[in-house]
Amino acid sequence: MRMNRTLIAAATAVLAVTAPGTALAATADDAAPSACRPANHLARIAQDQSSAGHLHFRVTLTAPAGYAPCVLAGSPTDLSFSDDGRTLPVTAGSYGDQTGAVTFGPGRPVHFDIQVRNNGRTSPADEASFTLHGPDGAIPGTSVAEGAFVVSEGTLVGPVRPGA
């Protein structure tokens, strides 16, 4: 009987400090925030292998544990490039299959390519901002990736692909 009184006293104390209508604890059904939201992932830019006449830079997105996987599709849009906080006057186009979808989340990084003409008229950059897309359209907010790269007129961005 002593154990039952202790449990009842503890339950009464918890109920006394819990506001009416609020849950005592998160349930297993509570959804984690989406990894696709800009605040919930990290993005880094690094030089990739060059191809004939082009430089390539890989933008890798990773999501820390605790976020829900999500689906991305096509190339990022609304790209803006900057160097030391100064916006560069470069408008990027896209290339590749814009209909393919990939799953992104913790343990499932994704990447996309920034393809730059290697014509000697490049400008250094250290940040890219962009809007990601899912199969149903744009994901609200602006993602930001940092790292040393270059851009020029004619810069193209490839679709999101699985892997780092």
Image: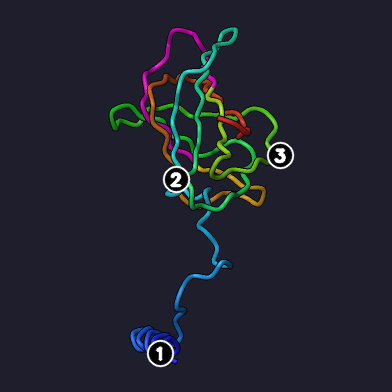
Mark 1 residue type: Arg
Residue 127 within the segment the image draws in magenta = yes
Residue 9 within the segment the image draws in magenta = no
- Foreground: disc 3 or disc 1: 1
In the image, residue 73 above or below residue 117:
below
Mark 2 residue type: Thr
For label 3, the SS is loop
The numbered mark, 3 or 1, whose residue comes first in the sequence reads 1
Would residue 52 appear left or right of 23 to someone viewing this image? Answer: right
Identify which residue is drawn at 45% across, 36% down.
Answer: 43
Residue that badge 3 annotates = 99
- Foreground: disc 1 or disc 2: 1
For label 1, the SS is helix
In the image, residue 158 above or below residue 39:
above
> How many residues crowd around disc 3 within 10 Å: few (fewer than 14), some, or many (20 or more)?
few
Q: Quadrant of the C terminus?
A: top right
Tags 2 and 3 touching, CB below 8 Å: no
> How many residues crowd around disc 1 within 10 Å: few (fewer than 14), some, or many (20 or more)?
few
Which region of the structure is painted magenta? Answer: 115-130
Tell me how far mark 3 sits from mark 1, CA to CA: 65 Å
Tell me how far mark 2 sits from mark 3, CA to CA: 21 Å
Tell me how far mark 1 sits from mark 2, CA to CA: 58 Å
Q: Which mark is residue 142?
A: 2
The numbered mark, 1 or 2, whose residue comes first in the sequence reads 1
Q: Position of residue 126 (x, y in %)?
A: 36, 26
Q: Position of residue 142 (x, y in %)?
A: 44, 45
Identify which residue is drawn at 53% across, 70% down.
Answer: 27
